[in-house]
């Protein structure tokens, strides 16, 4: 079958939910039995999202193969319940580098290299290759940014070229914002008319408009809107604000959006299966169940005067997934680590659990250690993720082993007790995995110790890849490791090494026994990147249930 392509663009403002729209379309088509994959086209010149400040662009999402990608890749994985890979994520930096490298190797046979066709050809080739690698019948491509930005014009040009003379093969979905001024009380379409005009100026006529708005577009306005944008009225799809992004596919299904897409692509209307998804969405809206509060102690919360969710998006999603399945209502509160360093722990007095997530560098680190100590002493359920695990080891070394000044060499290169360090064999291990740099990236196998909290969590969810050896695959994104020189002393004082990497024998999970603490677990890996709405991660399930028991 000839591969079909759906391009999804955005207009008026960023952050509209193009990724959510892309994932929702892909989910509906996949649940009709089609082989579907997604591709994200990012505008920036970075090769990936690994070195971008989380405040600038949100939480980099880590893929199985070690690719540090955009958050939308996480949205795709959660909706489609399938792993994304390097070929699903494009940046303009990757494209330019490939073209320049080819030119330097005489790959263009002396021809002058230009944006069109050489850059656009590279974009088209990569989109097609993504489909071919997954044997996809339909490829849904999200174009980053908004229409009219100079950074993404070559992506739009590539979509136009791919669509040229290919009827029933390529369609274009434009997601645009319709503001509702409070003094008028009705959605205004003029901004979208202008963004569609911008598309028209690039030779692109959208086939569908997804209207992001606070209110539903009524029939009268829909007809006028369609007239000015040259789109059939029935092809203007309402996408009003909802509490959960997982409701979007159901909104689209009610409007037969997927059926209209299949008709335009000249594909059969196969039966759709959405019962499991609908059950999950209904469960997420439940008002029953115990209500708990979890404190996330971090430092990537604000830009200027505004608080951000995106810096810890994968973590918050994982908490939601586990809470819904456990029928527990969870509120998360932000606790800035630097505020804790000023000496007040009042923000932690009325919470059911504490999480210290990913982080880098020394800013706020003493506040995080203080929060870990507070959780350990007051027996509040604690989950440390990556840096949160490492700092739990630091806290234990200082306050239980009595190693005053113990630290990670990331923050103090001259510490007398480097309980967390960059070990001598790490660089070779990373090189052997071919992920480059000095970080451990992507999936590593972890052997879990029998009888531990983690073992019980994985066993209850039937999560083991190898049940006999209790082995799981988990994603990593870090540079420092536990120092083996201190492990025996830590274990002698009660700390449990509950998991180690299969090949390198590096520490992956630390715990305190349940006889000492109801739930004190730190993971070097990132379970949040493997959580799905229909398959919450077992570590989060156990943690949320423990928090619900804590008064």
Image (spheres, grey):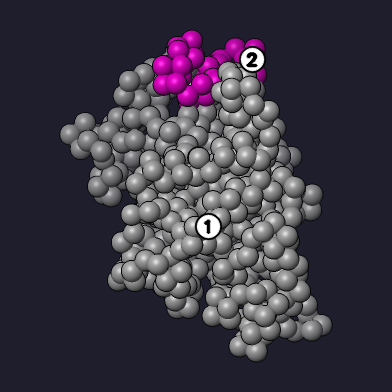
* Residue 495 position in % (x across, y down): 40, 28
- Residue 116 in the image, given as x and y percentages of width and height: 66, 40
Q: Does 478 appear above or below 236?
A: above
Residue shown at the point (38%, 54%) measured from the top left = 2
Name the residue carrying label 1: 165
Instruction: Report the residue at 64% width, 85% height from top.
Output: 223
Q: Over which residues does the magenta segment extend? A: 412-440
Q: Secondary structure at mark 2?
A: loop
Of labels 2 and 1, earlier in sequence is 1
**Which disc number belongs to residue 413?**
2
Gap between marks 2 and 1, in whole Å? Answer: 62 Å
Q: Is residue 319 magenta?
A: no
The quadrant in which residue 418 appears is: top right
Image location (x, y in percent) of residue 326: 37, 61
Q: Is residue 549 left or right of residue 44?
A: left
Q: Is residue 429 or residue 304 the one in the foreground? A: 429
Where disc 1 sits, the SS reads loop
Disc nearest the viewer among 2 and 1? 1
Residue 416 painted magenta: yes
């Amino acid at each position: 079958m000839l591969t079909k392509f759906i391009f999804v663009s955005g207009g008026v403002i960023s952050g509209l939910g193009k990724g959510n729209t892309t994932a929702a379309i892909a989910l509906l088509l996949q649940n009709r039995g089609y082989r579907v994959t997604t591709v994200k086209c990012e505008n920036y010149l970075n090769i990936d999202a690994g070195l971008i400040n989380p405040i600038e662009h949100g939480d980099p999402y880590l893929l199985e193969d070690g690719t540090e990608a955009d958050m939308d890749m996480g949205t795709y994985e959660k909706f489609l319940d399938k792993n994304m890979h390097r070929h699903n994520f494009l940046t303009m930096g990757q494209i330019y580098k490939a073209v320049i490298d080819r030119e330097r190797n005489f790959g263009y046979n002396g021809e002058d290299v230009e944006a069109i066709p050489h850059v656009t050809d590279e974009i088209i080739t990569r989109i097609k290759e993504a489909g071919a690698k997954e044997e996809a019948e339909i490829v849904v491509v999200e174009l980053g940014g908004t229409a009219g930005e100079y950074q993404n014009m070559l992506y739009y040009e590539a979509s136009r070229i791919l669509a040229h003379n290919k009827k029933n093969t390529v369609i274009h979905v434009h997601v645009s914002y319709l503001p509702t001024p409070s003094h008028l009380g009705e959605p205004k379409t003029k901004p979208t008319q202008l963004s569609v005009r911008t598309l028209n100026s690039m030779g692109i006529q959208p086939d569908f408009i997804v209207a992001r708005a606070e209110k539903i577009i009524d029939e009268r306005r829909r007809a006028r809107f369609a007239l000015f944008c040259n789109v059939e009225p029935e092809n203007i799809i309402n996408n009003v604000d909802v509490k959960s992004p997982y409701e979007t596919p159901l909104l689209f299904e009610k409007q037969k959006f997927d059926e209209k897409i299949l008709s335009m692509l000249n594909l059969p209307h196969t039966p759709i299966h959405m019962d499991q998804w609908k059950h999950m969405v209904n469960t997420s809206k439940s008002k029953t169940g115990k209500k708990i509060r979890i404190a996330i102690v971090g430092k990537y919360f604000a830009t200027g005067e505004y608080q951000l969710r995106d810096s810890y998006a994968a973590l918050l999603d994982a908490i939601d997934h586990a809470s819904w399945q456990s029928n527990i209502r969870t509120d998360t509160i932000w606790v800035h680590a630097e505020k804790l360093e000023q000496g007040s722990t009042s923000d932690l007095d009325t919470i059911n659990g504490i999480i210290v997530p990913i982080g880098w560098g020394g800013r706020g680190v003493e506040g995080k250690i203080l929060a870990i100590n507070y959780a350990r002493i007051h027996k509040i359920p604690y989950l440390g993720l990556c840096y949160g695990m490492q700092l739990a080891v630091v806290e234990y070394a200082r306050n239980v082993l009595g190693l005053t000044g113990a630290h990670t060499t990331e923050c103090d290169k001259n510490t007398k007790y480097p309980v967390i360090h960059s070990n001598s064999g790490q660089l070779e291990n990373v090189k052997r995995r071919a992920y480059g740099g000095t970080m451990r990236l992507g999936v590593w196998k972890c052997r879990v110790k029998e009888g531990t909290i983690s073992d019980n969590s994985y066993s209850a969810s039937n999560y083991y890849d190898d049940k006999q050896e209790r082995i799981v695959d988990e994603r990593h994104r870090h540079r420092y490791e536990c120092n083996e020189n201190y492990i025996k002393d830590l274990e002698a004082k009660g700390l449990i090494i509950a998991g180690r990497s299969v090949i390198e024998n590096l520490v992956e999970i630390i715990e305190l026994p349940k006889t000492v603490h109801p739930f004190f677990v730190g993971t070097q890996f990132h379970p949040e990147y493997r959580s799905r709405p229909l398959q919450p991660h077992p570590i989060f399930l156990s943690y949320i249930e423990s928090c619900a028991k804590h008064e």
